[in-house]
Amino acid sequence: MSTQGFYVRPTTCATEAGIRDKILANPGFGSYFTDHMAHVRWTKNGGWEPGEIVPYGPIMLDPAASVLHYAQEIFEGIKAYRHADGSVWTFRPEKNAERFRRSARRLALPELDDDTFLGSVKALVGQDKAWVPTPKDDTEECSLYIRPFMIASEKFLGVKPAKLVDYYVIASPAGSYFKGDLDAVSIWLSQNYNRAAPGGTGAAKCGGNYASSLVAQQEAEANGCAQVAFLDAVENKWIEELGGMNLFFVYKDGRIVTPELTGTILEGVTRDSILQLAREEGLTPEERRISIDEWRDGVKSGEISEVFACGTAAVITPIAELVTPEERIAGGRQTDIASTLRRKLLDIQYGRAEDRHGWLTQL
Ligand code: COI
């Protein structure tokens, strides 16, 4: 059988429905996986081979595969949403396909064409549709989190772009990323580590960026915080982003500010959608640098009323405070705009509001 150009290998690996339903009732984030995965191989001489849907399971890699040594790897995060009529949709996947190509260029990996990227997502979700959770009501936030990724599989210890590369897509039923959808979280200001430097890989969605954030994330957790915030690597003054999310600042005069894309910040799909929705709400979006001093002074004077984080996994999460060894800077006193924008976004994603932007694709 073939779907979306992907050959579906006959399989008997489906999880028993009772077990699957138990998982779907309380999936958490990133702990359970569906029955299948998509796979496409690339070789320097032959290009991309035909894709397959195969049973989910361990990948055989040579111990010398270059991804294990030099981290030549990229990934994406997309969600599939079940609407009230049972149909399943995804949100702006063409933006992820485009970013995946940009990340590939930065990591000297082969670019995957958008049709194969989208086809792989459609083929996998088509096969594992039963794994897309059904929200109990309009307030429950559950989805199928889809993780496309590409790794350098060539067996070779020289430092050079691999001639053998594998692309996979796996999927994981997901509840909210943080405990409590709209509960405000504390974040830790990284003192000793930066996430990205000019000319580095900050704008690419590659594993290395996340690996290098982990020690700072450990510090955050040791200090009772859920996430870590990074400043720029040159002046240690400008707010960049969290370990895996973008940031927004709401001003009481109606401005909504997010750090501009300087090449060291990931261009989030949720970030871009919020900029559009905020404008439609009558707010004035600004993409510009914002310093740690502006945050502190703005909250103190009451000029900044809200701070929130956003991402595919986190959706929109209010920030309660920014913690450093010396001080605790409040995140703003309100969550009105964060909750309005969050509701607007989720209503579109779950088909409860008209998709006037053409952001949804049926899977
Ligand atoms: C996402 O939001 O999709 C990410 O990749 C970030 C990660 C923290 C899960």
Image: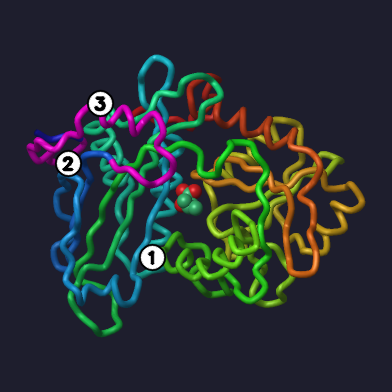
Give the magenta range.
4-33
Give the mark, 3 or 2, whose residue is nearer the N terminus.
Answer: 2
Residue underneath mark 2:
6
Depicted 206 relative to depicted 26: above or below: below
Residue position for label 3:
18
- Magenta portion: prevailing SS class: loop
The part of the image, by quadrant, that contains residue 280 is top right
What's the amino acid at mark 3? Gly
Q: Which color scheme did the rendering employ for the protein? A: rainbow
CA distance separating discs 3 and 2: 28 Å
The residue depicted at 25 percent of the width and 26 percent of the height is 18
Q: Secondary structure at mark 3?
A: helix
Measure the C-alpha gap from mark 2 to mark 1: 24 Å
- Sequence order check: which comes first, mark 2 or mark 1? 2
Horizontal placement of 193 versus 281: left or right? left
Secondary element at tag 1: helix
In the picture as drawn, the residue positioned furthest to the right comes out as 301
Query: What is the spatial separation of the Cα atoms under label 1 and label 3, in whole angstroms?
Result: 43 Å
> Nearer the N terminus, badge 1 or badge 3?
3
Residue 105 shows which numbered tag? 1
Depth check, front residue: 220 or 118: 220
Magenta span includes 306: no
What amino acid is labelled 1 in the image?
Arg
Residue 196: image location, x then y, percent: 56, 71
Mark in front: 1 vs 3 = 3
* In this rendering, the label closer to the viewer, 3 or 2: 3
Q: Quadrant of the N terminus?
A: top left
